[in-house]
Image: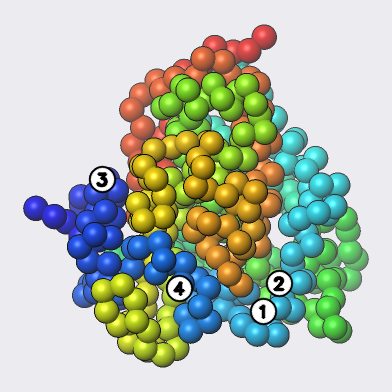
Amino acid sequence: MTVTDILSPECLTDPVPVWEALRETDPLSFHEGMNAYVISRYDDVERAFKDPVFTSDNYGWQLEPVHGRTILQMDGREHSIHRRLVTPAFKGSELTTKFVPVIRRNSRELLDAFRDDGEVELVDAFTTRYPINVIVDMLGLPKSDHELFRRWYTSIMAFLSNLTQDETVTANGMRTRDELEAYMLPRIAERRAEPRDDLLSLLGTAEIDGERMSDLEVKAFVSLLLVAGGETTDKALANMMLNLVRDPDQMAKVRADRSLIGNALAETLRHSPPVQMIMRQPSEDVELSGGTVPKGATVICLIAAANRDPRRYSDPDRFDVSRADLDFSKAYTAAANHTGFALGRHFCVGAMLARTEVEIAANDLLDAMEDIELAAAPVLQGLFTRAPSKLRLRFRPAR
């Protein structure tokens, strides 16, 4: 029997056959349980990200309750101003001079805890901690709060992934929103009054055309950064390491030429993206493959399905760091030809930060770990986001 329900047990176990069935038999599928249209072909998903008729108005109910109003909900001049306010921190000299040392230190501190052990559960020991620790340190907040932010990150991600609307998960997310706001607002006020050399000060004092972000807007951006920066890097790194360990030929290529780590991440974002779906809402009726999406409907864009569309990629289920039909030179820009970071005006502002974090971590891990192999079968979990819940690796410590 062909399964096309994205909330089915079959999809949670292995979504790839469900994505394929949707693409080939029901490219515009209406899901009654979520009252949403599901699109899965690359051209349709690309259009939903690039065509201005598709808005991000859905974030008003999807994200705002837990984050507050964020840059993802903005359009026009407001979006342009806010993007210009935050972008400098995540690319160029700010990223290189201020934050790369923070990233390197966190990678090596986590690695030092297991580099001589010969075996590690990489998700708990490294991937879930690394990006959150980096964000806390970039913000200039106390290292003693790493675990607090990791708990908040886990709670907010559970809220955003709560497609079945579990009331306990919702309540926990609301409590986290209040706790994070109570924690952040006094610290934002402190940085405005006495700026330091950290990201929180940069966000609080940045000014474009006489405009600054309000305290609540800075808090909302920090909340968004916690999950967007944490979840993508955490799961992208875990998925990339799993892809390489499963394919010794690809691993050998990357070990021999570390410049291919950027390719390996880009191909992971195509082949096994950490974020599997993003929602949009059209401002008028729109024709897509399979029919018409009515104005105001919620559209679930299946990034993971689009990225394996054989109409766009040759042998799409194969992981290949030298793939000819993926433009690696544009993979971290709004002109990318994969949908792992979305596309168009809402292309992920932290794409270069994520690339930098993964490249540093992967180099450190490969330097420290030889002959890496799976010590246990990984179990991939999640639907909104997806990666191994545990990734136990056996390795020979490098000397």
Between residues 257 and 398, which one lies in front from this camera angle? 257
Q: Is residue 377 left or right of residue 173?
A: left
Between residues 254 and 120, which one lies in front from this camera angle? 254
Per the image, label 4 sits on a secondary structure element best described as: helix
Instruction: Determine which residue is flagged by label 4.
Output: 48
Which quadrant of the view contains residue 185?
bottom right
The reply to whether dot 3 and dot 2 touch (C-beta < 8 Å) is no
- N-terminal of the pair, mark 3 or mark 4, is 3
- N-terminal of the pair, mark 1 or mark 3, is 3
Instruction: Determine which residue is flagged by label 3.
Output: 13
Residue 193 at what x, y percent from top left? 89, 71
- N-terminal of the pair, mark 3 or mark 2, is 3
Quote the CA–CA distance across marks 2 and 4: 20 Å
Quote the CA–CA distance across marks 3 and 2: 37 Å
Check disc 2: other Cα within 10 Å, few if <14, some if 14-19, many if 20+: some
Per the image, label 2 sits on a secondary structure element best described as: helix
Amino acid type at mark 1: His
Mark carried by residue 79? 1
